């Protein structure tokens, strides 16, 4: 938890309490439904919570922001971001129901009220959002195809509405066709070795016409 405060020192007491509570909730639920590997659960704050919050360093969301987390799995990056931005609304989607069971239990255990979950493939989601966040779900071309038409027209943030994707490693081949992409190195924000190759990829997307 100190790790989160190191990079986000202005959290409220309520946010601190919620971030702290994440550990016991995930430890408990992960024993019943495995959503986080054993190694990762020991490093939950580094590998999951702080990594998810890399998106917050790149693009602090406004009040009323509408965010879709595609393939949220056990709730990453959506749950840490929902704690960070209690006035924004988060829609967490996954095609596997038992993963969302963990998300629903964690959300209830935390008392977070700005998260909605849907058990569905993202292709079947019909809303529009300021940003679509994700980690470890699909290569960018597939992801862009899946999320077509889900971006809101009105721009409310300094970065253009679109995808904010947590990715790692060499992305030159995967992203070569996207002229408008911006890559943010998380090592510019966080000093831990884990972030050495980690990035946030911002890809502006056209709104639904
Ligand atoms: C490797 S997990 C990543 C989970 C989480 N984002 C994380 O980083 O911890 C990929 C998740 O994407 C989900 N997924 C894959 N394709 C999807 C689709 N088309 N629509 C919704 N969820 C999808 C899978 O069910 C799985 O839970």
Image (cartoon, rainbow, N blue to C red):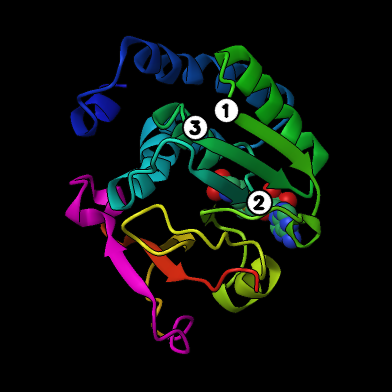
Locate the N terminus by quadrant.
Answer: top left
Of the residues tagged 1 and 2, which is closer to the observer? 1
Q: Residue drawn at (35%, 16%), measured in percent from left and top?
A: 16
Q: Position of residue 92 (x, y in %)?
A: 65, 41
Q: Secondary structure at mark 3?
A: helix
Quarter of image, res 72: top right
Q: Which mark is residue 91?
A: none
Residue 71: which numbered mark, if any? 2
Question: Which label sits in the foreground, 1 or 3?
Answer: 1
Q: Which residue is mark 1?
A: 114
Give the CA separation, mark 1 to mark 2.
18 Å
Q: Could you tell me residue 152's position as x and y percent?
A: 57, 59
Q: Which residue is mark 3?
A: 82
Residues in magenta, as a range: 173-195
Q: Decide if ligand 1 comes within 8 Å of the CB at mark 2.
A: yes
Check the image and report above or below for 24 versus 208.
Answer: above
Which element is circle 2 on?
Answer: loop
């Amino acid at each position: 938890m100190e790790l989160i405060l190191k990079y986000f020192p202005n959290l409220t007491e309520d946010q601190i309490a919620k971030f702290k509570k994440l550990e016991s909730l995930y430890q408990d639920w992960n024993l019943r439904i495995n959503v986080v590997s054993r190694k990762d659960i020991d490093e939950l704050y580094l590998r999951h919570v702080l990594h998810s919050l890399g998106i917050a360093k790149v693009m602090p969301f406004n009040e009323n922001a509408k965010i879709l987390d595609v393939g949220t799995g056990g709730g990453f990056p959506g749950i840490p971001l929902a704690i960070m931005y209690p006035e924004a609304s988060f829609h967490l989607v996954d095609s596997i129901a038992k993963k969302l069971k963990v998300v629903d239990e964690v959300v209830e255990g935390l008392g977070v009220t700005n998260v909605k979950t849907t058990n569905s493939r993202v292709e079947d989601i019909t809303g529009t959002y300021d940003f679509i966040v994700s980690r470890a779900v699909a290569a960018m071309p597939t992801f862009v195809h899946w999320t077509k038409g889900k971006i809101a027209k009105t721009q409310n943030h300094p970065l253009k509405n679109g995808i904010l994707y947590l990715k790692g490693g060499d992305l030159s081949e995967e992203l070569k066709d996207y002229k408008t992409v911006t890559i943010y190195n998380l090592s510019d924000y966080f000093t831990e070795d884990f972030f050495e190759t980690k990035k946030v990829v911002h890809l502006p997307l056209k709104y639904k016409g």
